[in-house]
Image (cartoon, rainbow, N blue to C red):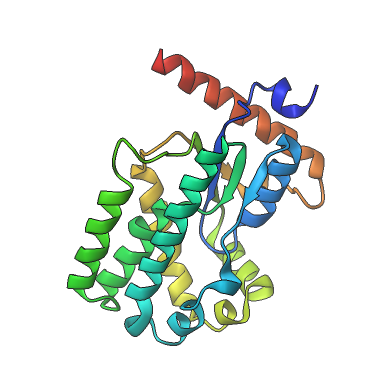
Amino acid sequence: MNLREKYGIPQSAVITIAGTVGVGKSTMTKALANALDFRTSFENVDQNPYLDRFYNDFEKWSFHLQIYFLAERFKEQKRMFEYGGGFVQDRSIYEDTGIFARMHKEEGTMDPVDYETYTNLFEAMVMTPYFPHPDLLIYLEGPLDGIISRVQERGRPMEQETPISYWEEMYGRYETWIESFSACPVLRLDINDYDLIGRPHEVESIIERIGHLLEQTTMLRK
């Protein structure tokens, strides 16, 4: 019996990993997908035509970047469910509007009219009964200093060159966002409680928690 069957994870489940830059979303995505025999869904950063431009000029390119992300994530969400599920997804569609677009609007790096256009489009596309929301969102969290160290050590060059104040601001916004998130069930994991690279067997305890939460959610819906 594999871990998916052992802990009652539906074969059609879609699990999304969320959290600020540096918390290990990609590592978690790969470990869970491998243990559950699920497919992975990763953000295609290398093909993003706006990302480098955005990091060089937030104000000029923030709206373009968010529209690009919205379109790509919407298509990917639709693809996963049309395939029949069985995916672990690196980063959710909800973070873009709840954190990034709002931060740029409030920091003055996105025009208020552009922000309103973006949020109206997001709500029309995503916040409807017809949009296929994930079965579970796993939120990875940890201490700010450790996360910033990870960005400086392992981040992409454009991330390493970004001022620390930007990551501090994003960290606080993530913490605020997750407290009110309600689009799907949430499992919060402290990154200091496991080491999927050094102790890969610890993925089983995470899958056990996933199975327990999904079972609770199913019972509440009955």
**Residue 172 in the image: x percent, y percent?**
40, 60
Q: Which residue lies at the image location 66% right of the left edge and 35% below the top edge?
A: 206
Q: Residue at x 31, y 50 (%)?
A: 125
Residue 105 versus residue 136 in the image, above or below: below
Q: From the viewer's perspective, is 14 left or right of 130?
A: right
Looking at the image, the residue that sits furthest to the top is 222
Q: Is residue 2 left or right of residue 211?
A: right
Q: Where residue 116 appears, x then y in whole percent? A: 20, 64
Q: Quadrant of residue 68?
A: bottom left
In this view, 5 is above or below 101: above
Q: Quarter of the image holding residue 200?
A: top right
Residue found at x 51% / y 60%: 20
Q: Would you place residue 165 above or below residue 14 in this image?
A: below
Q: Could you tell me which quadrant the N terminus lies in?
A: top right
The picture places residue 139, in percent across and down from the top left corner, at: 52, 46
Task: Specify the quadrant that holds the C terminus.
Answer: top left
Pick the front one: 112 or 82: 82
Would residue 185 be found to the left or right of residue 29 on screen?
Answer: left
Residue extending farthest to the left is 113
**Residue shown at 48% from the left, 70% from the top:** 167
User: In the orientation shown, which residue stands out farthest toward the bottom?
Assistant: 56
As drawn, is 66 to the left or to the right of 214? Answer: left
Q: Position of residue 71 (x, y in %)?
A: 40, 60
Please say if 157 is above or below 221: below
Residue 95 in sight here: yes
How many marks overall?
A: 0
Can residue 139 be seen here? The reply is no
